[in-house]
């Protein structure tokens, strides 16, 4: 009985802290500024695109911040629940591929699966132990202020863009 109370107390405390920190981060982040160290940690821990999209001006949802609970020993398994819920939302939008991508790579990647391809750096995060390196690379990109729009343009991530070019070439040949 005491153990349940302790676990509930820890969860309530973590929830309160996460809500408080998300509002503090939102209040301190100026429009058009780099994500900085917050973007670094968000990209490393929560998902590859979160910090980078913060540089685009997108905010981090409370549900995404709740994933930090997974870092706490013993009760960390609870931190998986927000990720699965976000992945389910991606699954509603993009089917099974969206759900699995949201679970294993990141919720935002699963949500954007219909409009953007998955980056090589995001695929490599799936490899055990080696996946730490691309996680840090994503964090450094967010810290440096790279935006998802820049990355999308340089890595040709927009879906359908290559197909349109091929169709135009085929029409010219005919």
Image (cartoon, helix red, strand yellow):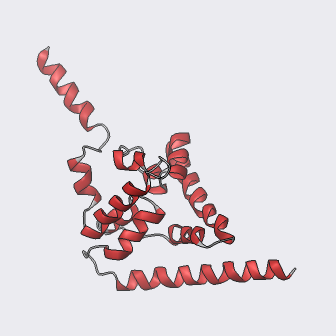
Q: Residue furthest right?
A: 1
Residue at 87 percent across and 79 percent down: it is 1
Image height of 86 relative to 160, above or below? below
Residue at 25 percent across and 68 percent down: it is 145
Residue at 29 percent across and 68 percent down: it is 55
| Observer-nearest of 17 and 137 | 137
| Observer-nearest of 163 and 157 | 157
Number of numbered labels in the structure image: 0
- Where on the picture, by quarter, is residue 135? bottom left
Image height of 49 relative to 166, above or below? below
Q: Residue furthest left?
A: 172
Image x and y of residue 80, in percent: 61, 61
Q: Residue furthest top?
A: 174
Please indicate whether residue 39 sits to the left or right of residue 67 in the image.
Answer: left
Residue at 66 percent across and 64 percent down: it is 77
Image x and y of residue 139, in percent: 35, 64
Q: Residue furthest front?
A: 129
- Where on the picture, by quarter, is residue 67? bottom right
- Where on the picture, by quarter, is residue 114? top left
């Amino acid at each position: 009985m005491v153990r349940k109370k302790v676990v509930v107390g820890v969860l309530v405390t973590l929830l309160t802290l996460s809500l408080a920190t998300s509002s503090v981060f939102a209040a301190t982040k100026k429009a058009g500024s780099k994500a900085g160290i917050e973007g670094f940690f968000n990209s490393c821990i929560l998902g590859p695109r979160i910090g980078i999209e913060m540089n685009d001006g997108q905010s981090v949802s409370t549900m995404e911040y709740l994933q930090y609970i997974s870092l706490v020993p013993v009760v960390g398994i609870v931190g998986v629940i927000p990720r699965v819920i976000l992945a389910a939302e991606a699954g509603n939008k993009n089917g099974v591929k969206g759900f699995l991508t949201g679970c294993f790579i990141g919720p935002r990647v699963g949500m954007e699966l219909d409009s953007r391809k998955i980056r090589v750096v995001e695929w490599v995060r799936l490899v055990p132990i080696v996946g730490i390196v691309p996680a840090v690379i994503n964090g450094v990109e967010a810290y440096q202020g790279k935006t998802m729009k820049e990355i999308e343009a340089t890595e040709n991530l927009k879906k359908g863009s290559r197909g349109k070019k091929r169709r135009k070439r085929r029409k010219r040949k005919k």
